Amino acid sequence: MTQPSTNGDNPASSGRTPAQGNRLDPWYDVYADRAHNLRASEIRALFSVVSRPEVVSLAGGMPNLKDLPLDRLAASAEKLIRNHGAQAMQYGSGQGWEVLRERITEVMTYDGIVGADPDDVVVTTGSQQALDLVTELFVNPGDVILAEAPSYVGALGVFHARQADVVHVAMDEHGIIPEALVETIRDVRASGRTIKFIYIIPNYHNPAGVTLSAERRPIIAEICLREHVLIVEDNPYGLLGFHSDPLPAIASYSPEGVVYLGSFSKMFAPGFRIGWAYAPHAIRAKLVLALESAILCPSMVGQMAIADYLSNYDWYGQVKSFRSMYAERCRAMLTSLEEYMPSCSWTVPDGGFYTWVTLPEGLDAKAMLPRAVRAQVAYVSGTAFFYDGTGSNHLRLSFCYPTPEEIREGVRRLSTVVNTEKEIVDMFGTASGNEAGAGSDR
């Protein structure tokens, strides 16, 4: 068995005091450069805190699964293993089970993607893996990825790990601003850098809570096609609009210019870890090769269970039930903000899980978080959603998991912290936090 080197270059064996704390790892100098780009998620770092029963967590984006028909799902799982266990327990296709890929094309029709070929669908371990594979295929160290300001923390982690540079594009209450996109593309290229793709969450944005307007979608598609910028469209929340089906996907306007990412985590259950990418044929072929190199094939048990759910259960009726539940929770969040935190502003979502709060001038959400946890409420600082760590005058509040009563109490607790911080700033003054982010509908 190969042992760590014992020569004088090994800080663990040389007797030298490491210059940095992370050099306590004797393998520090052996890692690839990209390993040093891995960073902890600010949301994951909160898990040990928010799991305490006395803390009201307005931080995590866990779907609420209380209305899932667990008895029926258990019976379905038993039947699946009894009748098709040998297939379910075996390796499958690297691209994903054909039956599920056909069901996925039917699901995508609700997003306006009609006539999709199942052969252009790749099943992945959640849409997070699809995003990582796309980034792996396209991005060299130093390449630029465009992303909304703010953007999904999990995507920023992938981009950072793959050594990309992220340039944010301004958005408002109607989503990404077309004029800002054009200006950003030109500025990046004028600096001599290469843009590989733009990452967009068009529906019920995480974290901003806004939706890209119907008028802007074809405009964004046309700009990117003209400028030869690939669009990576991430749509985990699309079916969770409070009042209607989603607007047509950007992919419906530019099927050859978009890699569309979908997931069953929010519309069904995250435990299966099944997502997908729908991509132009040549990109699809490379995605399959990359996926086979990473995991050989996605889980057959998970794929077959979800295909059975989509084929034999009123899954869309279940989605409507989720919509109603999340709409009630959103109302509780917005009315509580109105009552307890009138000094702040926030976005008003039409679906999804989140609202994006702007703090009064001078308050710092990241610095304030320990005091909020002490008050037994948790949120995510806006700094998690910007590549350069700006956004400290914002925070993301999630309404998907707590009950309406818990949401109200959580906002009340948070308001005591915000009001105290504001009194201190009003009395003594402080440096204002970084101003950035989506516009407010309030």
Image (cartoon, grey):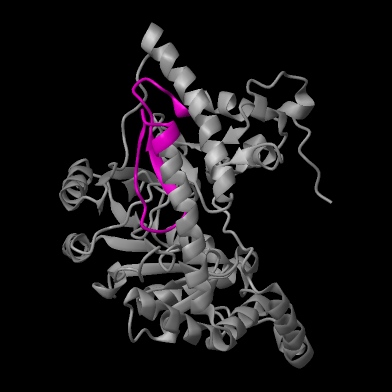
Which quarter of the image is occupied by the C terminus?
A: top left
Of residues 349 and 180, the one nearer the viewer is 349
**Quadrant housing residue 91:** bottom right
Chief secondary structure of the magenta portion: loop
Figure check: 63 above or below 54? below
Whole-percent x, y for residue 187 in the image:
19, 42
Q: Would residue 345 be counted in the magenta stretch? A: yes
Q: Residue at position x 71%, y 39% from top?
A: 52
Q: Is residue 146 left or right of residue 300?
A: left
Q: Residue at x 42, y 38 (%)?
A: 337
Q: Position of residue 358 (x, y in %)?
A: 36, 34
Q: Is residue 10 left or right of residue 290?
A: right
In the picture as drawn, the residue positioned furthest to the bottom comes out as 83
Residue drawn at (44%, 77%) of the image: 285
Range shown magenta:
338-365
Image coordinates for residue 201, horizontal then vertical, percent: 37, 57
Q: Residue at x 53, y 87 (%)?
A: 98
